[in-house]
Image (tube, helix red, strand yellow):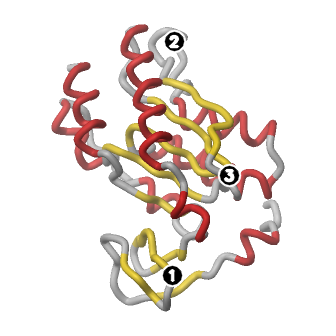
């Protein structure tokens, strides 16, 4: 097992007896997410990111996937408020179950970025990562993931709800933020069906 980086060790982790279901202020810092009883305090620079622009780029990639005949999933990696890599679902067109954009970006990030760069990276993804992708993202140890459509919403589009939510797998490694621009993300799934 790899040792945590200085940045990962510097993250403040607060323990609470209740899950926080939305953003709230705690000691002057915004708490972004919680799973179970663990809450992670966000990086202050993250608040100033252009979240809508990054999520809309993930939506564009999801639409590109549907144009090819793949399901509507798209993701981008963002560092210092700039998109560094993007990808879309290619499971059907490449006949490869591993070609979810989140997993492929985690793979690329592990090859191309050092641990500190990955910890400073946020993934914006059109749909909450499945358990397989969340496992890859846990290994990559991104600073956070931001999604639009939650896994619990997938039955609305005729798909199975994941047996495990991404926040459970990513707990205490990666902040999970979402849903963001949920109505726009849901429209992409409705258009595909």
Question: Which one is earlier in the sequence, the residue at label 2 or at label 3?
Answer: 3
> Marks 3 and 2: in contact by CB < 8 Å?
no
Toward which corner of the image does residue 9 lie, by quadrant?
Answer: bottom right
**Relative to residue 74, is residue 85 drawn left or right?**
right
Front-most of residues 118 and 136: 118
Crowd class of label 2 (few under 14; some 14 to 19; many from 20; radius 10 Å): few
- The residue where tag 2 is placed is 95
The mark tally for this picture is 3
Q: Position of residue 52 (x, y in %)?
A: 42, 45
Residue 29 badge: 1
Q: Position of residue 107 (x, y in %)?
A: 69, 36
* Residue at x 50%, y 49% (from the top left corner): 50
* Residue at x 47%, y 49% (from the top left corner): 51
- The residue where tag 3 is placed is 80
Residue 187 badge: none
Q: Position of residue 16 (x, y in %)?
A: 43, 88
Q: Secondary structure at mark 2?
A: loop
**Front disc: 1 or 2:** 1
* Residue at x 50%, y 44% (from the top left corner): 124
Q: Secondary structure at mark 1?
A: strand
């Amino acid at each position: 097992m790899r040792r945590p980086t200085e940045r990962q060790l510097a993250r403040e982790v607060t323990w609470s007896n209740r899950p926080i279901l939305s953003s709230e202020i705690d000691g002057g810092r915004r708490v972004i997410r919680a799973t179970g009883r663990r809450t992670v305090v966000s990086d202050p620079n993250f608040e100033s990111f252009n979240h809508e622009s990054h999520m809309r780029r993930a939506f564009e990639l999801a639409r590109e996937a549907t144009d090819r005949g793949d399901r509507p999933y798209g993701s981008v990696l963002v560092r210092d408020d700039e998109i560094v890599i993007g990808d879309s679902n290619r499971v059907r067109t490449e006949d490869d179950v591993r070609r979810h954009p989140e997993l492929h970006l985690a793979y690329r990030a592990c090859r191309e970025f050092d641990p500190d760069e990955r910890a400073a990276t946020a993934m914006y993804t059109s749909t909450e990562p499945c358990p397989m992708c969340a496992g890859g993202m846990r290994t990559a140890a991104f600073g956070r993931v931001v999604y639009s459509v939650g896994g619990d919403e997938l039955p609305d589009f005729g798909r199975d709800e994941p047996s495990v939510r991404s926040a459970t797998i990513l707990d205490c490694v990666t902040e999970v933020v979402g849903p963001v621009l949920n109505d726009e993300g849901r429209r992409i799934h409705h258009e595909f069906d």
